[in-house]
Structure formats: structure tokens, C-alpha cells
Image (cartoon, helix red, strand yellow):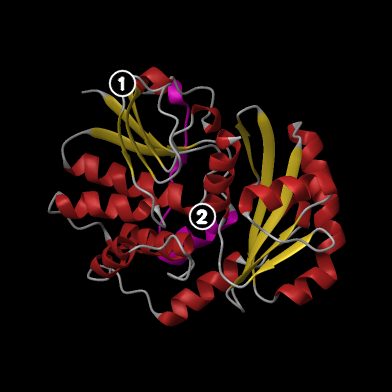
């Protein structure tokens, strides 16, 4: 029997970890030799989400030990661990802009919605299965995180429907939801380490840029305490990743709004044009929730259209 690894990008978030765990569980029920495994270090939201669900995180693995690979929440070879052979990838389930040329053997499902957990839950439902209680709860928390409790613009009716279907297995209370978001907006250690943990960099049409993102409760208090430290972290991340542009974007859950901070005029020009934002003193405030995945889609379209 061929050994199958279900995995995601290096240093995965809750959506990636929840999806690999749930999809590997489904494949095993279908008689396949499948395991979930990650590379790097799971992000804080993944650790908190699995802890809240009473679920053990998948194991850390090497891609060389498997005959086939299934990717969830990623469809770009640059974000994979180097031990994964793209030719072994047989299936991709994702909601990001795909880059499928490097995966010649893969069949792909790409849908733009709040969380890949929605698509994996749909797969389980279509197979006439119910996930285990712990797996169901991690999927629910991943959907809530990916949609910001269904407040984000990219939330879809399918996200809501799959969340409700999972509720037949695991009921997530409002108290659970409040505690979860409080947990993932609280960071320990330095702000640099927190931003580095979830930092994502991209190369679109030769333009190399990175986005530091986080969720917070109360923007003004956060900026008063941390604005200068954010700017210093951006410069360090820019140098570490050899990038041309970096910026910071955060979602204020308290006021259902978004905020962007850029370090210089050059970056301000790119972000203003690419994302359609108005800046003052390198800052921009938006009275709605805008997530990094939406920023990436907009910036990609802008750069490819130039």
C-alpha cells in the first residue's frame, strides 16, 4: 500500500494543521495509508486551536518517507519544505491563488473562500462520514479564524454551511469563540518573534515583498505601545528575507476594522496603488476587515497587470 503524506506549507497555521489532520483521517477511513505531518513549527493559532479542541497536533515529518503527497492550504512550491518532491504531489486543496505548473501529477480543487477547512469538511460530508469530535472542533475553529467569525469580506455561504454541519458533531459555544480569539491575539515573547512566526513573503513578477499580519483587540492602545517596535521588526524581516518591500497589516477585532503601516514612501506608493488605499504619515485605516490573503490577491493582480 502506498504511503500518503497530507501536509501544508512550512510553519503552518491553524487552517493548514486542521485540514491535514481531518483529510488524513478521512483517507484512512477509506482504507488508505495516510498520515498528517508538518514541517517547521506550527504557528500560535494552530497550537491554541488544537489545545482548545483537545486534539494532538500532527507529527513533524520528512517528505522523503512517503510515496504520495496531498497538499492542503498551499499550492505554491516555494512555500513547501525542500524534502517534498513536487512530482509526488497527487492532490491539492486550497483557497489561494494557485501556481500549479510545478505539480504535473496533481488534481486540484481551488475555491476562494474563508478557510480550506470548509473544503475539507465538505469532502468529509460528501463521503458520508462524520469527523471525530476533536477533528470537527479544529475545523470549526479554523473556519472561524479564516473568516474572522464570518466578518471578513471573503466569508462565503459555504463557510457558514460547513460550520453548521460540523456543529452536529462538536458544538462551539460563543464563550469558546471569545476565548479562542482572545488567546490568538495575545502574544508572549517579543513582537518581532510573533510577527516573524506568521510572516509571509512573495515574489510576483520579480517584485519581492512581505506582509506581517496579526489580529488585535483595540488598535489605538496597540499602536501607542508597539508602533515603533513594529517598524523596527519590519526592517529586520526585510533584511532577513532580502525583500524590496515589507508592510504591516492588522485586523482590529474590537472595532471590525483594518490598519496598514508601511516603513517608507516607496512602499507606501506600491501599497496605495496595489491595494487602493489612502495613506497619511505611512498609515492607512479601513473601516472593514481586510485579510492578508485578500491583500495578496489584489497585489498579485496589480503587479501582473502592470
- Residue 38 relative to residue 187: left or right: left
Which quarter of the figure is the C terminus placed in? top right
Q: Are marks 2 and 1 in contact (CB under 8 Å)?
A: no
- Residue 92 lies left or right of residue 130; in this view the side is right
Q: Residue at x 60, y 28 (%)?
A: 205
Q: x and y percent of residue 261 in the render? A: 76, 58
| Residue holding disc 1 | 105
Along the polypeptide, which appears first: circle 2 or circle 1?
Answer: 2
Question: Which residue is more in the foreground, 70 or 75?
Answer: 75
Outermost residue toward the bottom in this view:
175
Q: Give neighbour class at mark 2: few <14, some 14-19, many 20+ (Cα, 10 Å).
A: many
| Residue linked to disc 2 | 46
Q: Taking the image as drawn, is residue 42 in sight?
A: no
Above or below — where is 235 with respect to 67?
A: below
* Disc 2 element: helix
Q: Is residue 117 above or below residue 77?
A: below
Amino acid at each position: 500500500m502506498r504511503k500518503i503524506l497530507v501536509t501544508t506549507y512550512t510553519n503552518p497555521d491553524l487552517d493548514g494543521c486542521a485540514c491535514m489532520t481531518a483529510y488524513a483521517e478521512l483517507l484512512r477511513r477509506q482504507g488508505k495509508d495516510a498520515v498528517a505531518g508538518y514541517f517547521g513549527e506550527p504557528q500560535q493559532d494552530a497550537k491554541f486551536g488544537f489545545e482548545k479542541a483537545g486534539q494532538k497536533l500532527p507529527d513533524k515529518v520528512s517528505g522523503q518517507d512517503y510515496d504520495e503527497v496531498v497538499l492542503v492550504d498551499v499550492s505554491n512550491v516555494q512555500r513547501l519544505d525542500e524534502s517534498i518532491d513536487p512530482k509526488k504531489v497527487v492532490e491539492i486543496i486550497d483557497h489561494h491563488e494557485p501556481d500549479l505548473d510545478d505539480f504535473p501529477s496533481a488534481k486540484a480543487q481551488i475555491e476562494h473562500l474563508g478557510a480550506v477547512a470548509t473544503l475539507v469538511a465538505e469532502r468529509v460530508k460528501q463521503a458520508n462520514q462524520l469527523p471525530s469530535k476533536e477533528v470537527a472542533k479544529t475545523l470549526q475553529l479554523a473556519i472561524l479564524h479564516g473568516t474572522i467569525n464570518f466578518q471578513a469580506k471573503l466569508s462565503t455561504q459555504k463557510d457558514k454551511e460547513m460550520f453548521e454541519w460540523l456543529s452536529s458533531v462538536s458544538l462551539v459555544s460563543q464563550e469558546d469563540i471569545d476565548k479562542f480569539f482572545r488567546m490568538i491575539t495575545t502574544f508572549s515573547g517579543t513582537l518581532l518573534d510573533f510577527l516573524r512566526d506568521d510572516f509571509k513573503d512573495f515574489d510576483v513578477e520579480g517584485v519581492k515583498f512581505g506582509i506581517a499580519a496579526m489580529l488585535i483587540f483595540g488598535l489605538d492602545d496597540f499602536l501607542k505601545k508597539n508602533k515603533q517596535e513594529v517598524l523596527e521588526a519590519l526592517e529586520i524581516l526585510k533584511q532577513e528575507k532580502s525583500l524590496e518591500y515589507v508592510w504591516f497589516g492588522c485586523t482590529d477585532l474590537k472595532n471590525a476594522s483594518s490598519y496598514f503601516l508601511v516603513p517608507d514612501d516607496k512602499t507606501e506608493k506600491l501599497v496605495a496603488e496595489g491595494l487602493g488605499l489612502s495613506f497619511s504619515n505611512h498609515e492607512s485605516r479601513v473601516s472593514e476587515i481586510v485579510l492578508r490573503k485578500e491583500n495578496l490577491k489584489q497585489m498579485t493582480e496589480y503587479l501582473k497587470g502592470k
